[in-house]
Amino acid sequence: MQDHAIERTNETSSRTPSSGKPLSETTVLVSGAGRGLGAAIARAFAREGARVAINYRRSETEARALAAELGPRCAAFRADVADPQAVAAMTDAIAERLGPPDVLVHNALADFAFNGDARKRLETLAWADIAAQVQTAVGGGLALVKALRPHFAASGYGRIVTIGTNLVQNPVVPYHDYTAAKAALLAFTRTAAKELGPLGVTVNMVSGGLLRVTDASAATPEAVFDIIASQTPLGRVTTPEELADAVLFFASPWARAVTGQNLVVDGGLVFG
């Protein structure tokens, strides 16, 4: 037993940690990238020269227009990320067209509108409301990770970035279903980081606040944006483009020793 333990230790210590890849040499899969924040993330990676797979579920027109805008190193792929078979077929298509994804950004969101006046209160909230959000956030994340894990294992390298929310730390508006799903996704991010680390894969989360403006935040009254801005040290509401730049960090070689972390990008509204 002791000899085997020594052999395993020597084998592990002989491996050279991956320093990461330049973004220009990566293939990136962004779920829910047809519009809003996902589109901003796709543009950010394309700007850095990455090959970008733009996943969409219903926003085909927007996704294909974005792919055309970003050029021949980008393409649109349809799949409901909550459907493991569709995800597996999509990742095969991406590998054939752009190469196996090195980077996964799980941004896909079940249908949701940030309107505090119209949100469901506890007296009307049903488990089905929470389950629908969890199915896309965590179920989608699981399907994507399982589809990409064989490539990560074969290459000894991978980067996964999930998209969360600062409402987990500061539920200023109690969107029960959405926030519960994102909290579960944070837990999944950290447990996945623990299991995938030996494969050379880092898993981190970037959590935004209210963004000006995405389709999901289009229903938010202007007065709410003003209140958020007034309470933020930077004096303004974060944009999708600013949050996208933080995602680039976790996918870059600069973050090669960072995993299992949650970076809140909201202009300092929430500390810690």
Image (cartoon, rainbow, N blue to C red):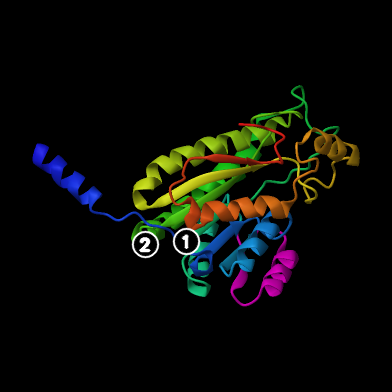
Residue 16 is drawn in which quadrant? bottom left
Residue corresponding to mark 2: 155
Assign a secondary structure to mark 2. helix
**CA neighbours of label 2 inside 10 A, class few (<14), some (14 to 19), many (20+):** some
In the rendered view of the protein, which quadrant contains the C terminus?
Answer: top right
Give percent across and percent down for residue 174. 74, 28
Disc sitting over residue 187 in the figure:
none
- In this rendering, the answer to whether 113 lies above or below 46 is above
- In this rendering, the answer to whether 259 lies above or below 83 is above
Left or right: 14 in relation to 226: left
The foreground one among 182 and 248 is 248
Assign a secondary structure to mark 1. loop
**What residue appears at the point 52 percent right and 74 percent down from the top-left corner?**
97
The foreground one among 126 and 253 is 253
Give percent across and percent down for residue 15. 27, 54
**What residue appears at the point 77 percent right and 36 percent down from the top-left corner?**
232
The three-letter amino acid code for the residue at tag 2 is: Ser
The three-letter amino acid code for the residue at tag 1 is: Asp
- In this rendering, the answer to whether 171 lies above or below 241 is above
Left or right: 242 in relation to 254: right
Residue corresponding to mark 1: 102
Residue 73 is drawn in which quadrant? bottom right
The magenta region covers 56-79
Residue 260 is one of the magenta-drawn residues? no
Residue 72 is one of the magenta-drawn residues? yes
